[in-house]
Amino acid sequence: MYHNPMLELKCGEHSYPLQLAPEHLLSVLGPRPFQRQGTPVELVERALDGCTDSLASFAPGDRVVIVTSDVTRPTGSEVYLPLLVSRLNSVGIKDRDIEIVIALGIHRKQTPAEHKKIVGELYGRIKVTDHECDDPGELVYLGDTQRGVPVEVNRRVTEADRVILTGAVTFHYFAGFGGGRKSILPGVSSRKSCMASHFSLLNPEEGSGRHPKAVAGNLEGNPVHEAMLEACGMVAPDFILNTVLGPDKQICAAYAGDWQAAHEAGCRFYNDTFSTPIEEKGDLVIVSCGGFPKDINLIQAHKSMEYASRALKPGGVMILLAECRDGYGNATFFNWFSYESCAELESALRKRYEINGQTAWSVKEKAERFRIVLVSKLPAEEVRTMGMIPAATLDEATELAVPMLPDDYKAYLIPSGGTVLPVHHS
């Protein structure tokens, strides 16, 4: 943490200078200082060196599927995928027997330019396929989890001789952490499986809201995490390579090995590095998602809104910088705001669950508890419908926020909201 009254906050590709009098600034919240233990390439190579036993069991002729994330989740894949393929080549596996499957979950398909960004120098050399959650012919049913989540997984993944999961460990607002088992469910699962696993975040009783353990930074007793673990166990991946990215979006740590143990090690490092203890909550939180692509759409930007809300007093004001150049991130997302209250939206969600509806409910719930000024490219009228206050620039947002604050208000600044979890022990 450091104090600096003049800061640049990103919104899309733009940077806004922020003027805030020092007496109003509680702190700038960011990751704890840590020392990178090597370059991105060195970190990945070192992690893979620990997987030589797993790789030694791979044989020429094995059909290998590598699962990796889509472009909305920066992972350093352009660095690690070529290194991983090189290791496979070294044990006799040919390029033609390797396929990269993009774990889209229910996200849109990727463009050729996005595929190139994801796979780096492998583009045009290794086959790349987008997962399709709505094509029954491309899915295989593997069974149900203990809580009744049907597990339907991409056929290319289930029929491969070897499966390697890759991705990045991050906070996840109800699965606890991203990465790891999430590459399978929701990454390469059917829409039905995705919906059912996400639905487990709600308490069983009507109107009772979210399960108390289904929160960012928690795996223990988290029903969503448990469903994902069971699904991943049905696929039984050969090994995993997960990275941690710093605020500069460069790899700062890498974990490889057993799909569960390596992921848990990554989660421990991530939690130690990116959760920030705070002594008190603020009247105002000014948070940037960290710029493009973290704020590509509102569904992605919601993560920053969720984490930043942990640093805000009830009824406090949040200024969220989220360009949202791709709009909401899903065609049905905005429709959920036709419900007047959170209670009505939750009731509708229980009758017809959609992941987008869950995110919409989470946005609406925060818009009811706090006053949120959104700096974005979204239409002003639609921002108001969602219960938020529209602004075109940070200066305009600040002008709108100040009259809602006490004269001696205290503020937190969070320049990279998607990677920082404020933790207040009351």
Image: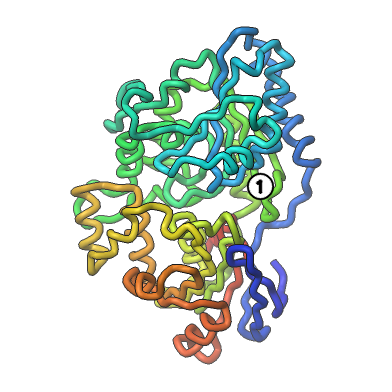
Disc 1 designates what residue? 245
Q: Position of residue 328 (x, y in %)?
A: 41, 58
Instruction: Specify the amino acid type for callout 1.
Output: Leu
The answer to whether residue 67 is above or below residue 111 is above
| Camera-side residue of 385 and 305 | 385
Residue 276 vertical position relative to residue 163 in the rendered view, above or below: below
Of 11 and 150, the residue lying toward us: 11
Q: Quadrant of residue 31?
A: bottom right
Question: How was the colour assigned to the protein in this rendering?
Answer: rainbow
Above or below, 152 relative to 327: above
Q: Residue at x 58, y 69 (%)?
A: 279
Residue depicted at x 71% and y 74%: 3
Which secondary structure, mark 1?
strand
**Left or right placement of residue 192 versus residue 112 in this view:** left
Q: Quadrant of residue 390?
A: bottom left
At label 1, counting other C-alpha atoms closer than 10 Å, the crowd grade (few under 14, some 14-19, many 20 or more) is: many
Front-most of residues 158 and 265 = 158
- Give the residue drawn at x 49%, y 83%: 401
Q: How many marks?
A: 1
Residue 282 point in image, percent of width and height? 53, 75
Asked whether the viewer can see residue 182, the reply is yes
125 to 176, vertically: above or below: above
Coordinates of residue 357 in the picture (x, y in percent): 31, 54
Q: Quadrant of the N terminus?
A: bottom right
Q: Position of residue 51 (x, y in %)?
A: 68, 22
Answer yes or no: is residue 267 visible. no
